[in-house]
């Protein structure tokens, strides 16, 4: 007994007829993950490990973007942003205080009695 291939058909409009289409939906841009800002804070402003926390949340946000979970990615991205702001403020504050203390106390060592 021979078996013949099954016929398949595709529902297509006849040639030359216009098909009613809707306007293409433009995809929303994915939420921000702040990975570069987190790397900067991790390397330069890592007071109290806030830069590390921001970097870990940024990586989690990027993983969620890849998994197409934009709500979770937005949540992790906002948390990373908060950690980045705090880490940057604390890092700048520590840097400014360090510079002021150096200029106040270093000249005292060079003063001869």
Image (cartoon, grey):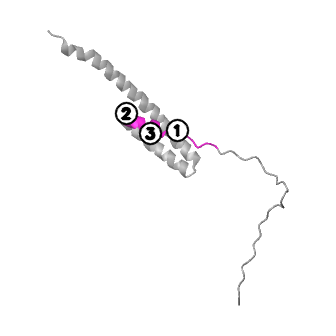
- Residue at numbered disc 3: 54
The magenta span reads 28-44
For image coordinates 44% across by 39% down, the residue present is: 54
Separation of marks 1 and 3 at Cα, in angstroms: 10 Å
- Point out the tag, 1 or 3, that comes first from the N-terminus: 3
Q: Is residue 28 above or below residue 107?
A: below
Q: Is residue 35 above or below residue 111?
A: below
Q: How many marks?
A: 3
Q: Identify the mark at residue 33; answer none if there is no mark.
A: none
**Front residue of this view, candidates 71 and 55:** 55
Image quadrant in which you'd find residue 32: top right
Q: What is the quadrant of the C terminus in the image?
A: top left
For image coordinates 50% across by 49% down, the residue present is: 63
Image quadrant in which you'd find residue 10: bottom right
> Is 45 a magenta residue?
no
> Is 34 a magenta residue?
yes
For image coordinates 77% across by 70% down, the residue present is: 9
Q: Residues within 10 Å of mark 1 (few under 14, many from 20)?
A: many
Callout 1 secondary element: helix
Q: Residues within 10 Å of mark 2 (few under 14, many from 20)?
A: some
- Residue at numbered disc 1: 78
For image coordinates 46% across by 38% down, the residue present is: 36
Callout 2 secondary element: helix
Separation of marks 2 and 1 at Cα, in angstroms: 21 Å
Q: What is the quadrant of the N terminus in the image?
A: bottom right
Front of the two marks 2 and 3:
2
Separation of marks 2 and 3 at Cα, in angstroms: 13 Å
Q: In the rendered structure, are the residues bearing label 1 and label 3 in contact, judged by CB atoms less than 8 Å apart?
A: no
How far from the left and from the top, in percent, is residue 71? 58, 46
Q: In the visual, does 29 lie left or right of 108?
A: right
Residue at the limit of the structure toward the top, as seen here = 113
- Residue at numbered disc 2: 44
């Amino acid at each position: 007994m021979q078996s013949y291939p099954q016929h398949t058909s595709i529902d297509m409009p006849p040639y030359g007829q216009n098909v009613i289409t809707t306007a293409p939906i433009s995809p929303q841009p994915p939420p921000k993950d702040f990975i570069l800002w987190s790397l900067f804070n991790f390397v330069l402003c890592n007071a109290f490990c806030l830069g590390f926390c921001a970097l870990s949340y940024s990586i989690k946000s990027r993983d969620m973007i890849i998994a197409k979970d934009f709500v979770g990615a937005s949540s992790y991205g906002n948390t990373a942003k908060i950690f980045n702001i705090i880490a940057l403020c604390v890092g700048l504050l520590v840097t400014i205080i360090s510079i002021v203390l150096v200029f106040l106390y270093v000249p005292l060592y060079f003063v001869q009695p």
